[in-house]
Amino acid sequence: MKAITLRGISPELAHEIEARSRRNGTSLSRAVLDMLSDRAGQTGVRRYHDLDHLFGRWTQDEADAMDAAVAEQRLIDPDAWD
């Protein structure tokens, strides 16, 4: 993957990048990549957060707990198959 260094970013653009990063819970790099992809029309897979205020979002700990609970449900009990 190619690395690019950007210089001369205006304070207004830097503020918008930081705001998008905070709003979407992503890194600054991801925010810049998303903005570039959007502008270039190369959206690919997008994650939308526009309904989060209605449904909420899981923290990483909550998502890990759900994954662990689902993993337990996928275990096969050999005694149940007798």
Image (spheres, rainbow, N blue to C red):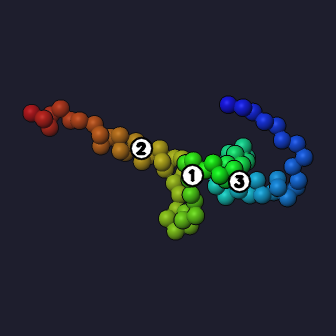
Alpha-carbon neighbours of circle 2 within 10 Å: few (<14), some, or many (≥20)? few
Residue to which mark 2 is pinned: 67
Residue 23 placement, left or right of 75:
right
Q: Residue at the location (78% across, 36% down)?
A: 4
**Front-lying residue, 8 or 59:** 8
Q: Which mark is residue 39?
A: 3
- The amino acid sitting under disc 3 is Arg
Q: Residue at the location (61% across, 50% down)?
A: 43
Q: Is residue 1 above or below residue 68?
A: above
- The amino acid sitting under disc 1 is Arg
Give the CA separation, mark 3 to mark 1. 13 Å
Residue to which mark 1 is pinned: 46
Residue 47 image position (x, y, % from top left): 56, 53
Name the N-terminal-most of marks 1 and 2: 1
Is residue 59 shown to the viewer in this render?
yes
Residue 59 image position (x, y, % from top left): 54, 51
- The amino acid sitting under disc 2 is Asp
Residue 70 image position (x, y, % from top left): 35, 44
